[in-house]
Amino acid sequence: MGTNKRYAAQIDKRMDERILQTVSANKPLQTLSEQELRLDVYPLTTSPQPLEVLAWVRFGGHAVQVRARAVRWTQKAVGIEFSVGDTEHRTWVWANAVDRAD
């Protein structure tokens, strides 16, 4: 039996969601520390309209890429919000871990 080429993207998306739900249920979401953020040095920008982004986050030792909203940032870090099922998450990640979504 071959692969389902017609619905491959939808199947991949569902698998990614299941992996994210499993990892997020078992491990704590990591965020940058105050020392890493250095808000006393870098100016903070807050956006009234969040930008849609793809961001790498860590739950414990597991890195996963999520669709998120960038709501604040500095020169070095981005504050993002994203949902996993019914749970809303907020965290800071390094700026180079974030790309604009398509």
Image (cartoon, rainbow, N blue to C red):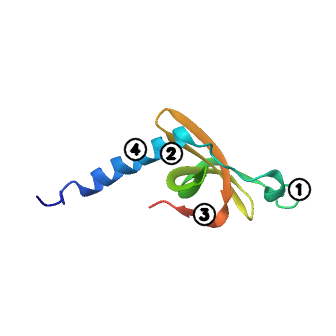
> Residue at left 52%, top 38%?
25
Where in the figure is residue 44, as x and y percent of width and height?
78, 54
- Amino acid type of the residue tagged 4 in the rendering: Arg
Disc 2 residue type (three-letter): Val
The answer to whether mark 4 and mark 2 are in CB contact below 8 A is: no
Of residues 30 and 26, the one drawn nearer to the viewer in this rendering: 26
Look at discs 4 and 3 and give the one toward the viewer.
4
Marks 2 and 3 sit apart, C-alpha to C-alpha, by 19 Å
**Going from the N terminus, do you reach mark 4 or mark 3 first?**
4
Residue 102 point in image, percent of width and height: 44, 61
Depth check: give the residue in front, 1 or 46: 1
Between the C-alphas of marks 4 and 2, the distance is: 9 Å
Give the CA separation, mark 1 to mark 4. Answer: 39 Å
Disc ID at residue 97: 3
Q: Is residue 14 left or right of residue 49?
A: left
Q: Earlier in the sequence, mark 2 or mark 3?
A: 2
Q: Are dots 2 and 3 in contact, CB under 8 Å?
A: no
Q: Between marks 1 and 2, how big is the CA–CA gap?
A: 33 Å
Residue 18 numbered tag = 4
Q: Residue at x 62, y 45 (%)?
A: 29
Find numbered disc 1 in the image and state the secondary structure of the residue it sits on.
loop
Between marks 1 and 3, how big is the CA–CA gap? Answer: 22 Å
Q: Residues within 10 Å of mark 2 (few under 14, many from 20)?
A: some
Q: Quickly name the residue at label 1.
A: 40
Amino acid carrying mark 3 in the image: Ala
**61 with respect to 3 (left or right):** right
Location of mark 2 (residue) = 23
Q: Quadrant of residue 77?
A: bottom right
* First in sequence: mark 4 vs mark 2: 4
Helix, strand or loop at label 3? It is helix
